[in-house]
Amino acid sequence: MAQYLQLKNIIERLQETGSQELTTQVDLGCNFYVNAEVPDASTIFVALGYGFFVELTLPEALAFIEKKNKLLTELSEALTKDSAKIKANIRMVLEVMMGVPCSKQTDSYWAGIQQGNEESSRKLQPAFPWSAAYGVGSMFTSGA
C-alpha cells in the first residue's frame, strides 16, 4: 500500500510540473541506484503483481491506484476482523483449558470435587449451551 501511495505522490508532482522529461534514479537492486533520463513521462508502467506490468497514462494510473488502495484497505479490514475473532476463540479455549472458572456453577463443581462431595458434582449441568453438542458436558458429570 505504501508503494502505491508513493507512486500517487510522484504522479501528482509530475502532473503539477507539466514537463514531459524526467530525470530520476532507478534502483537496480540491493539499493544500487543509477541515473536515468525519461524523455516522455506521459505514460508509466505500473506493477500489477505477479511480475506483470501495464503501461498507463498518468490519469489512468491515478484511477488504478485509487481502486487498488480501496481494495487493499477492504482486504486489510477483513483480515483484521478475522484475526480478532481467532484471537478471541484462542483466548476462550485457553481459559477453559487452564480451568479458569467461567461461572458460579463451575465454581461449585470444582469446590465439590476438592471436598470429595460427588453429589454436588453429579447435579451440575453444563455451563455452556454448546458444551453438550461438543462433548464438553462430560467433564461436568461423574459418568453416572
Image (cartoon, rainbow, N blue to C red):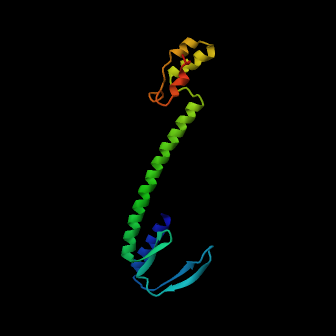
State left or right for residue 84 relative to residue 99: left
Relative image position of residue 52 (x, y in whole percent) = 47, 72
In this view, the residue in front, 51 or 110, is: 51
Relative image position of residue 48 (x, y in whole percent) = 45, 70
The answer to which quarter of the image holds residue 43 is: bottom left
The answer to which quarter of the image holds residue 110 is: top right
In this view, the residue in front, 138 or 52, is: 138
Relative image position of residue 8 (x, y in whole percent) = 43, 70
State left or right for residue 66 relative to residue 92: left
State left or right for residue 5 relative to residue 90: left
Q: Quadrant of the C terminus?
A: top right
Q: Using the image, determine if residue 95 lies above or below residue 124.
A: below
Q: Using the image, determine if residue 87 lies above or below residue 122.
A: below
Residue furthest to the front: 144
Q: Using the image, determine if residue 27 lies above or below residue 78.
A: below
At 50% from the left and 20% from the top, the residue drawn is 105
In this view, the residue in front, 65 or 136, is: 136
At 55% from the left and 26% from the top, the residue drawn is 101
